Image: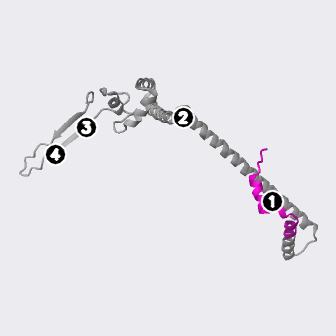
Amino acid sequence: MEGSDTTIISSATSPSSSSYSPPQSTHHVVISPCAACKILRRRCVEKCVLAPYFPPNDPLKFTTAHRVFGASNIIKFLQELPEPQRADAVSSMVYEANARLRDPVYGCAGAICQLQKQVNELQEQLAKAQAEIVNVQCQNANLMALFCMEMSSQPNTSPNDNQHSFDNYFATYLSTNANFLDENNLGSLCEQSLWT
């Protein structure tokens, strides 16, 4: 293949001077061009700007960014950035390129809008749930206030009589206000919009 710059460095171990000599082992270190240089079919120099961010084992990463931004724009962009920010910039370009390939019209802006819409819907649900909690707490406080007023209006009695009177009062309150704990009423509370 023209333009590939594969270098093979081999070193052989020298046979030992003892009577037993193990078989010679050969270590191969393969230095290959980065994925960007392979795809662009050019020589990968030692200080290649793209090599640290587009390794040879992940060619899809460069292919995706190259299709959307172009190699020259990627190189210019990376050369303008300080070294510590380049890895994040490459990740951002690859993410944006993937989003643009999935949605050519809106790209990553479409994904951001979708997520923003979900956040707004969840915030509305949370606000409704918090309002329902406050409503139930108010009903509970009103019930306790009514009970305390009822208890204070009665003459002092023994603790057993207080418990008996509480049970009677609660039963009476529930029977006169049957819709307070009616299941259909609770269901409609959850479905009602509190913001209209």
Foreground tag (1 vs 3)? 3
Residue denoted by label 2: 108
Q: SS of the residue at dot 2?
A: helix
Q: Which mark is residue 25?
A: 4
Is residue 177 within the magenta segment?
yes
Quick check: 183 above or below 46? below
Mark 3 is on which residue type?
Answer: Val
Mark 3 → mark 2, Cα distance in angstroms? 38 Å
Q: Residue at x 24, y 39 (%)?
A: 29
Mark 4 is on which residue type?
Answer: Ser
Specify the color scheme. Answer: one colour
On the picture, is 116 further left or further right than 169? left
Residue denoted by label 3: 30
On the picture, is 75 further left or further right than 7? right
Quarter the N terminus occupies: top left
Q: SS of the residue at dot 1?
A: helix
Mark 2 is on which residue type?
Answer: Cys
The earlier-in-sequence mark between 3 and 2 is: 3
Residue denoted by label 1: 140
Relative image position of residue 15 (x, y in whole percent): 10, 45
Foreground tag (4 vs 2)? 2
Q: Which residues are magenta?
A: 169-196
- Of residues 17 and 10, the one nearer the viewer is 10
Q: Residue at x 85, y 58 (%)?
A: 142
